[in-house]
Image (cartoon, rainbow, N blue to C red):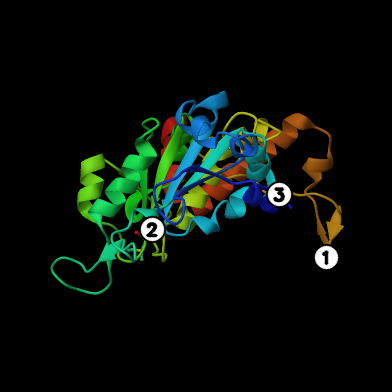
Amino acid sequence: MLRALLVSTAVTVYSLPMSKPPAKSHGRLSIGASSAPRDLMTDRPHLEGAWVAKVITLFPEVFPGVLGASLTGKALAEGLWRLQTIDLRQFGEGKHRQVDDTPAGGGAGMVLRADVMGKAIEFAKKDGDLPLVYLSPRGKPFDQALARRFANGLGLVLVCGRFEGMDERVIEHFGIEEVSLGDFVMTGGEIAAEAVVDATVRLLPGVLGNAASTEEESFSAGLLEHPQYTRPATWEGREIPDVLTSGDHGAVDRWRHAESERITRERRPDLWKSYSSTEE
Ligand SMILES: C[S@@+](CC[C@H](N)C(=O)[O-])C[C@H]1O[C@@H](n2cnc3c(N)ncnc32)[C@H](O)[C@@H]1O
């Protein structure tokens, strides 16, 4: 329902002399932008101060995707953040709008062209500089600290690779930060972009109903989260730990903290090492 609403109200914010517009925006700005959508994006780029994600992709139709659901979708519709997709194909060369070519030096696959990607990035930058991120398996592993850094800014331009990736000169020329979702290879950067935006947007003020929930969850204090339980009190012969139904809030806090420490120590020696060194 929400997704359909967002997609059906998406407004073209820019039009090159081409068959298809390259950029679409999602969210509240687009809903109210029917008479002059371009003005809203170019003359008042930070209207309402909303954090913005600009995604350069060959597959704009996969956005907002999961970002249009639940809390991120509600926040998008309320204008707490904005999403703009930039269709890389529209910057392609020739009749077929070619975006890729064979790798210099030979080898398998195709590489996204520097000139095509360069034009798309210049387009994304034209109404204000934002940090540039290329989703890439070679990048810095994405983590909660990075999500916090991104949430503290005005927004991001996210570049989704395809094929064998993009020409290295683009990364050097624009000083792009490479960010990885993990040590595995996906076919494209779109899922990684949605993951980065999801983790970032939920940290923006007003997106989560209960602000305390980001303070207590995994990674926030350098620990993994304690186990969670809810009704029924007994399930398949398993009980909720007594302390959680004792009504003793101090005891509950101590139990949760001890469980967080135990789980972190058992599962993530790397996190445990840095946590215990800061506790000393
Ligand atoms: C098939 S991959 C290219 C892999 C590249 N040839 C390599 O070996 O590093 C195509 C695109 O998917 C995206 N991608 C794949 N795995 C990723 C990951 N773990 N994190 C972030 N992006 C990823 C990147 O945008 C990448 O350019």
Residue 69 rendering spot, x and y as whole percentages = 66, 50
SS state under label 3? helix
For the C terminus, the image quarter is top left
Which residue is at the front of the view, 277 or 154? 154
| Mark 1 crowdedness (10 Å alpha carbons): few <14, some 14-19, many ≥20 | few
Q: Amino acid at mark 2?
A: Arg
**Residue at figure coordinates x 28%, y 57% from the top left:** 166
Upstream in sequence: badge 2 or badge 1: 2
Tell which of 276 and 152 is nearer to you.
152
Q: Is residue 239 above or below residue 77?
A: below
Q: Residue at x 68, y 41 (%)?
A: 74
| 213 relative position to 185: left or right | right
For the question of whether residue 143 can be seen, the reply is: no
Q: Is residue 280 above or below residue 31?
A: above
**Residue 26 visible at all:** yes
User: Nearest the camera: 200 or 65?
Assistant: 65
Residues under numbered marks 2 and 1 in contact, where contact means CB atoms less than 8 Å apart: no
Q: Residue furthest front?
A: 17
Residue beneath disc 1: 236
Q: Identify the residue under disc 2.
A: 89
Across and down, in percent, residue 223 comes to 53, 41
Per the image, label 1 sits on a secondary structure element best described as: loop
Relative side of 96 to 204, left or right: left
- Point out the quarter of the image occupied by ligand 1: bottom left
The answer to whether 145 is drawn above or below residue 6 in the figure is above
Mark 1 or 3, which is nearer the eye? 3
- Label 1 residue near ligand 1, CB within 8 Å: no
Q: Which mark is residue 2?
A: 3
What element does badge 2 sit on? helix
